[in-house]
Image (tube, helix red, strand yellow):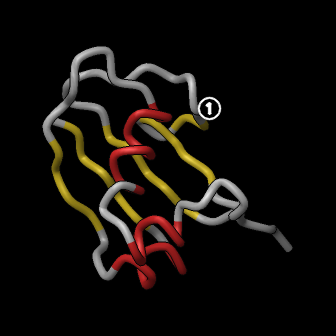
Amino acid sequence: MLTILYFASLRESVGKAGESLALPVNATVAGLVAELRSRGDAWAAALDAGKRWRVAVNQEMATLETPLHAGDEVAIFPPVTGG
């Protein structure tokens, strides 16, 4: 299982703060994002390739190629600016 967390405007767009998902074989961040987009409407819009969002796996910044493993925590969030 993966724990998926959604933050800020992404959480508002998809209507949930998080969920648990079964881990597909040979899972990567790209595969997870594609699966979430396939839910349609709000999911596809929020995670559109043209939108700016980031992913962290186990609190480390990740790329689309980052592999996923059972027990991982995946956070998806909009870019953050500091001040």
Q: Nearer the viewer, residue 71 or 51?
A: 51
Q: Is residue 35 above or below residue 24?
A: below
| x 72%, y 65%: residue | 80
- Left or right, 46 with respect to 82, comes to left
- Left or right, 64 with respect to 73, comes to right
**Quarter-of-image position of residue 81:** bottom right
What amino acid type should be assigned to the residue bearing mark 1?
Answer: Thr
| x 41%, y 35%: residue | 58
Residue extending farthest to the right is 83
Label 1 belongs to which residue? 63
- Left or right, 16 with respect to 21, comes to right
| Residue 36: % across, % down | 35, 54
Quarter occupied by the C terminus: bottom right
**Quarter-of-image position of residue 41:** bottom left
- Left or right, 18 with respect to 7, comes to left
| Residue 19: % across, % down | 20, 59
Q: Tell me if mark 1 has few (under 14), some (14-19) or many (20+) residues whose alpha carbon lies within 10 angstroms of its own.
A: some
Q: Is residue 46 above or below residue 53?
A: below
Badge 1 element? loop
**Quarter-of-image position of residue 49:** bottom right
Give the number of callouts. 1
Q: Nearer the viewer, residue 41 or 68?
A: 41
| x 45%, y 81%: residue | 13
